[in-house]
């Protein structure tokens, strides 16, 4: 079993920055792709960014240029650097990982970390 734990959320003023982390733990697994999603109150969960083991990243259009996803393969950890934050970025941010354990492929999710952008 793989566990994903997010951290780094909090309250920040508009225009500020936050850096989220997501660490995967467990044994006997490998990860191909990881990503960040977010869910604002009353809205569906939406893609923020994804990254594969080579480091190639993909962003939602509204976040490209402000958000940067990165990955430390040795630590099975991804990061999301968020700059120029706006009130509409307020949401619970979740990470996920496409995990291979033996012959099984699983999509694992973390519990989420709250990001609130407010003055």
Image (cartoon, helix red, strand yellow):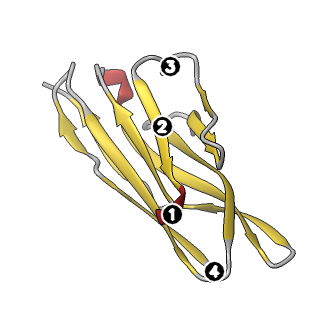
- Categorize mark 1 by other alpha carbons within 10 Å: few (<14), some (14-19), many (20+): few
- Looking at the rendered structure, the secondary structure element under dot 2 is strand
Residue lying at the far left in this picture: please name it. Answer: 119
Q: Which residue, given by chain and number where applicable, does mark 3 sit on? A: 64
Point out residue 2 in the picture as x, y percentages from the top left corner: 59, 74
The Cα atoms of the two marked residues, 2 and 1, are separated by: 16 Å
The Cα atoms of the two marked residues, 4 and 2, are separated by: 24 Å
Looking at the image, tell me whether mark 2 or mark 3 is earlier in sequence order. Answer: 3
Q: Which of the pair 34/116 is nearer the observer?
A: 34
Q: Which residue, given by chain and number where applicable, does mark 2 sit on? A: 69
Q: Nearer the viewer, mark 2 or mark 1?
A: 1
- Looking at the rendered structure, the secondary structure element under dot 3 is loop
Looking at the image, tell me whether mark 4 or mark 1 is earlier in sequence order. Answer: 4
The Cα atoms of the two marked residues, 4 and 3, are separated by: 32 Å
Q: Which mark is residue 1?
A: 4
* Residue 44 in sight here: no
Residue occupying the point 58% across, 24% down: 60
Mark 4 vs 1: CB contact within 8 A: no
- Categorize mark 2 by other alpha carbons within 10 Å: few (<14), some (14-19), many (20+): many
Q: Which mark is residue 74?
A: 1
Point out residue 118 in the picture as x, y percentages from the top left corner: 19, 27
Looking at the image, tell me whether mark 4 or mark 2 is earlier in sequence order. Answer: 4
């Amino acid at each position: 079993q793989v566990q994903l734990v997010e951290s780094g959320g909090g309250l920040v003023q508009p225009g500020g920055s936050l850096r989220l982390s997501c660490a995967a733990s467990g044994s006997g697994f490998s990860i191909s792709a990881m990503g960040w999603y977010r869910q604002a109150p009353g809205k569906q969960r939406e893609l923020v960014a994804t990254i594969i083991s080579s480091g190639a990243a993909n962003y939602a259009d509204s976040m490209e240029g402000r958000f940067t996803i990165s990955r430390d393969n040795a630590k099975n950890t991804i990061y999301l650097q968020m700059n120029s934050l706006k009130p509409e970025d307020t949401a619970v941010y979740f990470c996920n990982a496409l995990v291979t354990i033996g012959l099984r492929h699983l999509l694992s999710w973390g519990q989420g970390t709250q990001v609130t952008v407010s003055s």
